[in-house]
Image (cartoon, rainbow, N blue to C red):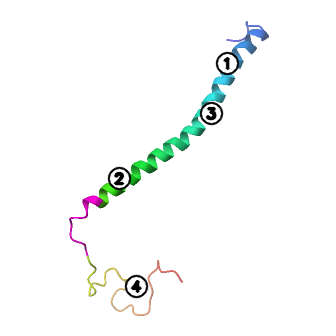
Amino acid sequence: MWTSVDLFTKAKTSVPVLLYTTEQICVAHFMVYVFRRWHARLNKKHDLESIGDTEGLPEMTENPNDHSMSENNNAPGMVGHSNENEKI
């Protein structure tokens, strides 16, 4: 494509391409911050709406006799053995 074109013409066409590419990089850099802020605002709005939706619902309380949520979920007969996920 560029074999029959002289060096001056190549240089003249390369400058706009270089400037356009640089402009794209700079604009994209700043747009990242704009979109992150926009995304954070959407998440905050969604969280506030979900909190507002649960205000009328009764709160769930943990049953003290229910041991399914305990840290040590050992099978019967496994007294003294800790859970694999438990940190030492």
Using the numbered discs, state the Cα–Cα distance from disc 4 to disc 3 in whole angstroms.
Answer: 53 Å
As shown in the figure, which amino acid type bears the numbered disc 1? Pro
Q: Tell me which label, 2 or 1, sits earlier in the chain.
A: 1
Rendering quarter of residue 49: bottom left
Mark 4 or 2 closer to N-term?
2
Label 2: how many residues lie within 10 Å, few (<14), some (14-19) or many (20+)? few
Vertical order, 23 against 46 (above or below)? above
The numbered mark at residue 72 is 4
Along the line of sight, the residue nearer the viewer: 9 or 48: 48
- Give the magenta range: 52-60
Amino acid carrying label 2: it is: His
Front: mark 4 or 2: 2
> Which label belongs to residue 25?
3
Secondary structure category for the residue under label 3: helix
Q: Residue at x 49, y 42 (%)?
A: 35
Q: Is residue 59 magenta?
A: yes
Q: Which of pointers 4 and 1 indicates the residue nearer the eye?
A: 1
- As for residue 84 lying within the magenta part, the answer is no
Q: CA distance from mark 2 to mark 1?
A: 43 Å
Q: Foreground: 32 or 82?
A: 32
Q: Secondary structure at mark 4?
A: loop
Tell me whether circle 4 and circle 3 mark residues in contact (CB < 8 Å).
Answer: no
Q: Nearer the N terminus, badge 2 or badge 3?
A: 3
Image quadrant holding the N terminus, namely top right
